[in-house]
Image (cartoon, rainbow, N blue to C red):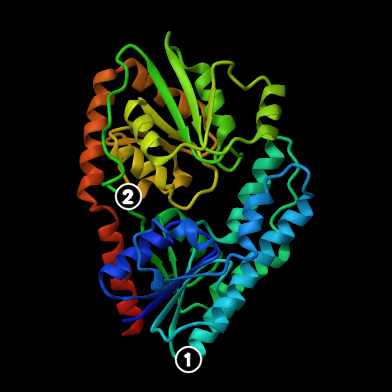
Amino acid sequence: MKVVISVIGRFHSFELARELHRRQALQAIFSGYPRFKLSGEGLPADRIRTFPYVQAPFMALAHKPWLPGALVRGWERLAVLSLDRHVAAHLPECDVFVGLSSCGLATGRVARRRGARYVCDRGSTHIRTQDRLLREEYERWGLPFAGLPARVIEREESEYAEADLITVPSSFTLDSFVRQGVDARRLRRLPYGVNLARFGPAGEPAPQAFDVLFVGGMSLRKGVPYLLQAYARLQHPRKSLSFAGAVSPTLVRHLKARGLWPEDARLLGHVPQPRLRELMSRSHVLVLPSVEEGLALVQAQAMACGCVVLASRHTGAEDLFDDGQEGFIVPVRDADALAQRLQQLADDPALRRQMSQRALARVQRAGGWHDYGENAMAIYKELLA
């Protein structure tokens, strides 16, 4: 079997590429990242193809506050379209083409004309579900949101229709496709793994403190306001709240204006993985109250460090652990439920330690990215058969 992958950045696609390469099935992986950013991915140089001419400058400039939003959105669209056209024009012979959603339509059509199979790899909910949830959330918190552009939605749905198969990472995401009328026979659940060599216990939480950790880009999509509401109700003399990941000054200002921002919140910004491992190991709980998510990688990473996870049902948590055993799963947009579970963990250190041990054992049994690779190979073989 020969598999070609296309991805605008890195995401989980390079984990897939490594697993396929170990099984001698990777023909090539195309990325919009420059080659120097991919040198540590553990793949032979001749298996990595890059087209960085649009995506690389976009990455360097997109966060600049002086850049108009319309220009950023147009540039982002141009990056995925130009990568797709490049891969379509240079697609090597393969049996399966796996395109991350939004950047695989033209290449998928070329692959199918040649007799190969096209797999659309979607990391989030159905794009119409994603658009609805985000619209609702921005309206709820009084922030402007124009919605996802119609042409972006149309392109995604064209990919869904063109693909021989759509892979999604969680039961939550799969259900969103079924609810949008996609035939379940064209869907496969393919949960992500975790790198157990990079993530494992590296310390213990302070016994007299209660440290709450959030990891990810700060946004309404990630449910940050609900975390702040729950944290405000948490009673503990030495509580702390840390944010690791990209900071949104606009959201912080908005939450401060609403009186939701705690004075003791720590904004750590981007944290390299060795430091993140230490943070997770020394935190009492990782909270991820996302409104829309595929399967947040940080959950399995935290579990591998022995950190208890408290997550909403929209994070794919139900595919990783059982509620009340290795962590807690609460309804989406429910600050009361978050506060109740936070208080329970703070008041019962023995329970938190038990959950920590169970989480560590559960994620170690899952087999890391190896099982992800095995499942992917099984799906592709089934498709070819």
- Work out whether mark 1 precedes mark 2 in sequence or the reverse, and give the earlier one: 1
Q: Amino acid at mark 1?
A: Arg
Spot occupied by residue 267 in the image (x, y as percentages of width and height): 55, 27
Q: Secondary structure at mark 2?
A: loop
Q: Residue at x 42, y 49 (%)?
A: 316
Spot occupied by residue 108 in the image (x, y as percentages of width and height): 52, 80
Q: Is residue 148 left or right of residue 330?
A: right
Observer-nearest of 101 and 4:
4
Question: Quick check: can you spot residue 20?
Answer: yes
Q: Amino acid at mark 2?
A: Val
Observer-nearest of 380 and 271:
271
**Residues at marks 1 and 2, CA–CA distance in whole angstroms:** 34 Å
Q: Secondary structure at mark 1?
A: loop
Spot occupied by residue 229 in the image (x, y as percentages of width and height): 56, 24
Judging by the rendered image, the residue that carries numbered circle 2 is 194
Observer-nearest of 318 and 121:
121
Q: Residue at x 33, y 32 (%)?
A: 308
Residue 114's label in the rendered image is: 1
Spot occupied by residue 142 in the image (x, y as percentages of width and height): 74, 35
Q: Residue at x 64, y 42 (%)?
A: 137
Quarter of the picture containing the C terminus is bottom left
Task: Write down the quadrant of residue 221 in the picture.
Answer: top right
